Image (cartoon, rainbow, N blue to C red):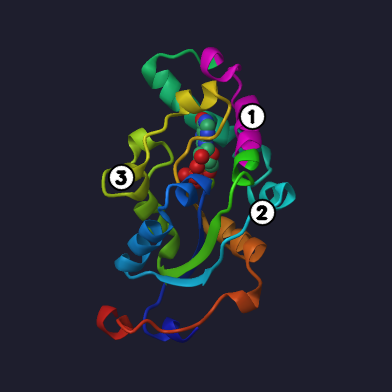
Amino acid sequence: MTDKKFAPGIERTFAMVKPDGVQRGLIGEIIARLEKRGLKVVALKMVKPSIEHIDEHYPKDDKWIARLGNKGFTVFDEQGISRKEAMGTEDEFEAGKQVRGWLVDYLVSAPVVPMVIEGVQAIEMVRKIVGSTLPSKADIGTIRGDFSTDSPLAANLTKRPIRNLVHCSETQEEAEHEIAHWFSADEVYEFERSDHAAMF
Ligand code: IDP
Ligand code: MG
């Protein structure tokens, strides 16, 4: 990548406007926030994925599933809501399995807009711009903090994933897996932004 010599630490990450973001007409707003920060969109498309494709997108290991189940539990514990009432189980792995199933079904319900974002510390920067998973914890100024208001309780009681508009990779490992899963090498472009010299 030509940029590497100007700015060490350049990374690529994967982000995707989820069905709620597409249906609410927020594709442009979401991409604009990433671009305005100085990050570069190097791959982009709109697709309606298959169940199999989404199933392979999200991790399947027990640790990830338990962590997923635990996210909602942290809020229920804070609010004094019974885990069993909110989730039908006290077990984070069982809860995670349910949430993963809802996620997979939801992500195939409408088109999504996957993209590859490149820039300095892109993985962390995109996470920051997108904001916390739980809308109540997402700072104002982040995409989720400004445009979403869903809660794990509301989501779980109606057996659906929290609607928080965007997916983005959390780690280098997720980024590599997700980029390769959604894009072939020739769909990811190399080019220089015109403001590159001013930024670096
Ligand atoms: P992330 O999207 O911020 O990376 P993850 O923990 O990887 O968050 O969870 C994936 C997605 O699963 C979230 O974006 C959200 O839509 C959904 N989700 C997470 N926890 C819950 C929950 O407790 N109930 C319903 N949906 C959840
Ligand atoms: Mg995640």
From this viewpoint, is residue 47 visible? yes
Predominant SS of the magenta segment: helix
Q: CA distance from mark 1 to mark 2?
A: 20 Å
Q: Which residues are magenta?
A: 84-103
User: Which mark is nearer the camera, 3 or 1?
Assistant: 3
Instruction: Identify the residue at image location x=71%, y=47%.
Output: 51
Residue at mark 3: C-beta within 8 A of ligand 1: no
Q: Nearer the viewer, residue 26 or 155?
A: 26
The tag earlier along the polypeptide, 3 or 2, is 2
Label 2 CB sits under 8 Å from any ligand 1 atom: no
Residue furthest to the right: 52
Provide residue 84's location: percent of width, then percent of height.
56, 14
Secondary structure at numbered mark 1: helix
Left or right: where does residue 149 sit relative to residue 61?
left
Q: Disc 3 on helix, strand or loop?
A: helix
Kindly check if marks 3 and 2 are in contact, taking CB atoms under 8 A apart as contact: no
| Residue occupied by mark 1 | 98
How far is mark 3 from mark 1, CA to CA? 27 Å
Q: Tell me which amino acid carries mark 3.
A: Asp
Q: Residue at x 64, y 65 (%)?
A: 180
Q: Is residue 121 above or below residue 2?
A: above
* Classed neighbour count for the residue bearing mark 2: other residues with Cα under 10 Å, few (<14), some (14–19), many (≥20): some
Query: Taking 147 as reference, is 156 above or below it?
Result: above
Residue matched to label 3:
146
The circle drawn on residue 172 is none
Dot 3 or dot 1: first in sequence order is 1
Residue labelled with disc 2 = 49
